[in-house]
Amino acid sequence: MQTPAGVAIQDGQLTVVNWLHVLMNPSWLYRLPHMLTAAYLTASFMVAGVGAWYLLRGKHQDFARRTVALGTAFATVLIAGQVFIGDLVYGTMLKYQPSKMQAAEGFWEKQSQSPAPYYWFIIPDQKNQRNRFAVGTPYLGSIWLTHSLNGRVEGLKNTPRELQPRMALVFYAFRIMYCLAMLMFAMGVASLWLRFRGTLFNSRWFLWLLVFMTPSGIIATLAGWYVAETGRQPWVIYGILRTVDAVSPVPSQALLSTLIAFVCVYAVFLTAFLIFTFRIIRRGPVEAPPYAEASGSIKNAFRPHVLDSPKRLADSQFS
Amino acid sequence: MDLPLLSASFLAFTLTLYVILDGFDLGVGILLLFQPAKVARDHMVDSITPTWDGNETWIIMAGVTLLAAFPIAYSILLPAFYLPVILMLLALGFRGVTFEFRVQSKGHRRAWDVAFGVGSLVAALMQGFILGGLMQGVTVQNRHFAGSVLDIFRPLPIISGITLLFGYAVLGAGWLKLKSNVSLQYFASRSLRVFAPAFAAFFGIACIYAVRIQPGIRAQWASHGIALACLVSLFAIAAGTLTALSGKSRPALPFVLGLLLFVVGISGTALIVFPQIVPFSVSLWDAASSSTSQRLVMIGAACVTPVVLAYSAFAYWIFRGKTPENGWEA
């Protein structure tokens, strides 16, 4: 969808010519690890955040030390990799979907001024193709984006107006993901330093930061998806099929009503999920089973009686 | 080799497995609404917990096969059945989360059980609506859906929705009879006594009404009259036996008879729809994708299906026999 390959239009219909090319399209090799690493990062920060909360409360010390140590260790390794993979994804997108990255950096003019600033906050004016207001760090844009002191960055005006994505959505989604990634990187470096000094478990400021970073992976992943999906508009299959042309014959009232239904139902799910998750976190790890069901070997999995172990029975709160 | 026919057979296979397998666990969910005792409800949910997720993989397989092998049929049927499909997905979502949430909930387990039951009920109803919508025919012009999304709320889909609801309840009751302990046997028998005749009656009404309103079905009766008549008689005999024996049969018999009812019903449906894929306007060869896509679908199916079958069989094997009184985990 982002970098379609292996397809051709034959008598007005999009047909697959080569399935291997469809699967091995230009961006999959970077997107797949990018998303996988994001998922593991999300889990690492969740685990570390819950552990840090226990340490701050002085509860479940053993368990909390293990989770904080494990979570920060994984996060440190993963974020280092993720910054690198993210840069590769950025490069691919710059090549295949330049309009996405033009919008993500907040530049309008075909060539930015030199040296280019790195924008942190802008109020884009899509109609007049300019920023009404922009705050940035001078030189940083040139350094980060062109790896030189005075390089210029291409802006959204390089893309014909009717094929431009909405700059505000792409810019802010990208900023959120990018800033969270930098925060994660800083946390990773800090955890290494504290680990080296042996004060990882009693630096309260760091533990508090970990608690605040608990949902960071989820937010960054969502923001990343916003960059990917709003940034490729107005295309649904990039360069081939526009979103307006892909609309189904279902009338808009029907779509609106089901969208409202989805939002309501998932709001209920999310609320219940959060309530139960917080309850489980508050209850702590004491009641978790000491070992996985049917642990040991695959042979045990074939024996139903393993599930009836008295130890689990005693631990289980639902018996 | 006739690839579209092969893909269509695979589609029929996955849909049959879905209806039969998810049918009984949706049925248990529906019966949950009629069970006042909390302990009994826990026991009912325990009887389907290990296998329900495996059962639901088949509808995903069916959806993917329809999309990849018959893209034109997909682009007609999905808009035509947009509302029931979305409602079904929401209902299945409710059911899916309730499996996890009801155990966590302390004070509100009853509410979650109602959500579970209503989710099952709505999902069953909507699947019946879709079946009825297929039988009443889909308005197609120039390979595009040309009807209204509200066409589905006509008498035949409604009758067929209620029919499938009763049918799933019969399967669910048969499953409980097979898997549950003494305390639920009476409940299961009573459910069978109510739902088996209701299912048969509504099935009859749906068949007669469908023949009246849809000339395409009359045409299929004219060409496959004997086969369809045999299926209807088989259905009647099985339903009669099920109703008569519901109280005092061997534990496996009601479930087997329920499965028989569904296999007969599905065979009849297939006989009426074939060789169309969008009844009664687009044949499966007209809706088929290119042969490279068909081949990819079949290769994928050949790799994945044995794994899913093995996983399901493994789950059913491990959790064979009666459901323990305190659930599988205790």
Image (tube, coloured by chain):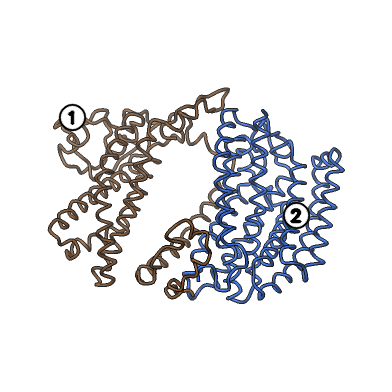
State which chain is coloured blue.
Answer: B
In-image side of B230 versus A228 (left or right): right
Question: Does the residue at mark 2 contact the one at mark 1 (Cβ under 8 Å)?
Answer: no
Both marks 2 and 1 on one chain:
no
Distance CA(mark 2)–CA(mark 1): 74 Å
Task: Give amino acid for label 1.
Answer: Gly
Chain ID for brown: A
Up/down of A98 relative to B273, above or below? above
Residue A178 appears at what percent x and percent y? 27, 45
Q: Chain of mark 2?
A: B
Q: Give the residue number, with chain letter if any, for mark 1.
A: A151
Residue A86, compared with residue B181, is above or below; it is: above
Q: Residue furthest front?
A: A299
Crowding at mark 1 (Cα within 10 Å: few <14, some 14-19, many 20+): some
Q: Nearer the viewer, mark 2 or mark 1?
A: 2
The residue labelled by disc 2 is B260
Can residue B90 be spotted in the picture? no
Q: Can residue B319 be spotted in the picture?
A: yes
Relative depth, front residue between B37 and B206: B37
Q: Is residue A197 left or right of residue B274?
A: left
Q: In the visual, does A145 lie left or right of A306?
A: left
Q: Amino acid at mark 2?
A: Leu
Residue A151 sits in quarter: top left
Q: Tag 2's secondary structure?
A: helix
Task: Name the secondary structure under disc 1.
Answer: loop
